[in-house]
């Protein structure tokens, strides 16, 4: 299973906003704290806003904050928002229920992969953003990892 760097950055941005919830933070503040460029943060905001993960307000008193309570937000929600290939994954029990005229082994393969993807997403759904924050606090925080500019779309 391979996720893009953009998704990893998105989880970090959302976690940063969760750590400051309910206050608003600025894009440059997030970029500085996480070792990302402002361009990368702005690029992530559109998708996060469209998925109702983040709420943005322009202007002098504006900023970025979580779209809802961080205790209710899972890593799985963020992955689904930033990884389009996972957006249509339904519950494993429903994956591959219509064989569409496939040979039995094709149907079985599709069902097996669907169950694997859903197990992966199901596990991510059990991890709340607040869980990530608690782990960081226990470790005493970590220095920001700098972004690689070689390709955000890996």
Image (spheres, helix red, strand yellow):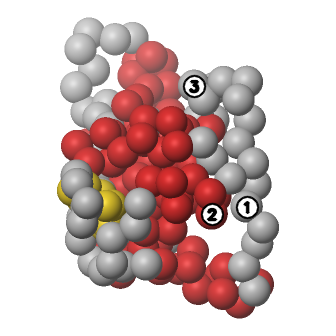
Q: Which of the two discs, 3 and 1, sits closer to the camera?
A: 1
Crowd tier of the residue under label 2, counting other residues whose Cα lies within 10 Å: few below 14, some 14–19, many 20 or above: some
Circle on res. 144: 1
Foreground pick, 127 / 60: 60
At label 1, counting other C-alpha atoms closer than 10 Å, the crowd grade (few under 14, some 14-19, many 20 or more) is few
**Quadrant of the frame with the N terminus:** top right
Residue 2 x %, y %: 63, 35
**Residue at 76% in and 72% down:** 142
Please state which of the two labelled residues, at mark 2 or mark 3, is closer to the viewer.
2
Q: Which residue is mark 2?
A: 33
Secondary element at tag 3: loop
Who comes first in sequence, dot 2 or dot 3? 2
Quarter-wise, where is residue 47 in the image?
Answer: top left
- Residue positioned 51% across, 68% down in the render: 16
What is the number of the mark on residue 153?
3
Residue 93 rendering spot, x and y as whole percentages: 31, 48
In the image, is 97 to the left or to the right of 19?
left
Q: Residue at x 22, y 43 (%)?
A: 50
Q: In terms of secondary structure, where does tag 2 sit?
A: helix
What element does badge 1 sit on? Answer: loop
């Amino acid at each position: 299973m391979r996720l893009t760097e953009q998704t990893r950055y998105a989880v970090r941005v959302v976690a940063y906003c969760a750590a400051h919830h309910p206050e608003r933070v600025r894009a440059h503040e997030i970029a500085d704290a996480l070792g990302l460029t402002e361009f990368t943060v702005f690029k992530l905001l559109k998708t996060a806003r469209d998925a109702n993960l983040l709420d943005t307000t322009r202007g002098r008193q504006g900023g970025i904050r979580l779209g809802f309570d961080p205790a209710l937000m899972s890593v799985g929600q963020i992955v689904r928002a930033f990884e389009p290939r996972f957006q249509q994954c339904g519950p494993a029990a429903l994956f591959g229920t219509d064989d569409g005229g496939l040979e039995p082994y094709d149907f079985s393969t599709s069902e097996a992969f669907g169950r694997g993807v859903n197990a992966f997403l199901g596990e991510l759904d059990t991890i709340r953003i607040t869980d990530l924050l608690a782990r960081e606090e226990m470790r005493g925080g970590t220095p920001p990892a700098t972004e690689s500019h070689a390709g955000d779309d890996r």
